[in-house]
Image (cartoon, rainbow, N blue to C red):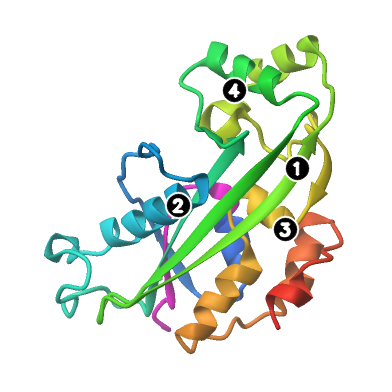
Amino acid sequence: MRKPDLLLASQSPRRRELVALLGLPFEVTVADVAEFPLASETPAATAVRLSQAKAHAACPERGRGVGGDFRAGLSVRVIVACDTIVALDGEVLGKPTDASEAKSMLRRLRGRSHTVYTAVTLLNPVTGRTQTEVSETQLAMRTYTDAEIDVYVASGDPLDKAGAYAIQHPGFHPVAELDGCYANVVGLPLCHLTRCLRAFDIQPAQDVPAACQAHTGRHCPVYAAILL
């Protein structure tokens, strides 16, 4: 049996679905990292720091530290870790702690524009080499009603999502306009991941832009600029 190329350091079912579109064998693990921004840290920098921390947390030799001896690592070629940040006016909106906070976040986002960043980090468990890419998407939310917020929050869907929403939710449909990568907002920008993989001489087995567009049902205007 072929050994997996990738170890995905995420329990997100959405990220598992997206990674599967690469056509590469992979396994899944959990990376236990405290997710919070640091003082004076930009949202993009927060995403980068946390994605790198998750990649190292998923490595069995994580106690050696960044750049340490990883030779006793996994039988996978690379570890893949991600962190997605929702930023409104430069403020990071994390995962809500309860329904009340979820409603508050959704009211703040309603009818306004914000930015979603996802940092993708690849870590070679043998050498300790890393590669990180950051995707940025601009979004404008529609003017959903308080009643719609109540129904959506009652479903429980917002409670494990940064910014308290899922762009792909079939009932809520929170986003009115989007400029950038749609998969980035779901939690894993596949073209940026592909660029990282190429840096490690790993080529996806599928046509990534075609597979992503078929999966999301959306035309992507940005993939060609990313995958030059």
**Mark 2 lies on residue:** 45
Numbered tag placed on residue 179 in the rendering: none
Is there a contact, CB below 8 Å, between mark 3 and mark 4?
Answer: no
**Mark 4 lies on residue:** 156
Percent coordinates x, y for residue 176 in the rendering: 85, 37
Q: In this view, does 206 lie above or below 26?
A: below
Q: What stretch is highlighted in magenta?
A: 1-14
Instruction: Check the picture and name the quadrant holding the C terminus.
Output: bottom right
Secondary structure of residue under mark 3: loop
Q: Local crowd at mark 2 within 10 Å, few (<14), some, or many (≥20)?
A: some
Q: What residue type is labelled 1?
A: Leu
Secondary structure of residue under mark 1: strand
- Among numbered discs 1 and 3, the one appearing first in the sequence: 1
**Mark 1 lies on residue:** 139
Kindly identify the residue that appears in the image at 77 percent across and 29 percent down: 112
Secondary structure of residue under mark 2: helix
**Mark 3 lies on residue:** 181
Q: Which amino acid does label 4 sit on?
A: Gly
Of the pair 146 and 140, the residue shown nearer to us = 140
Q: Is residue 85 above or below residue 88?
A: below
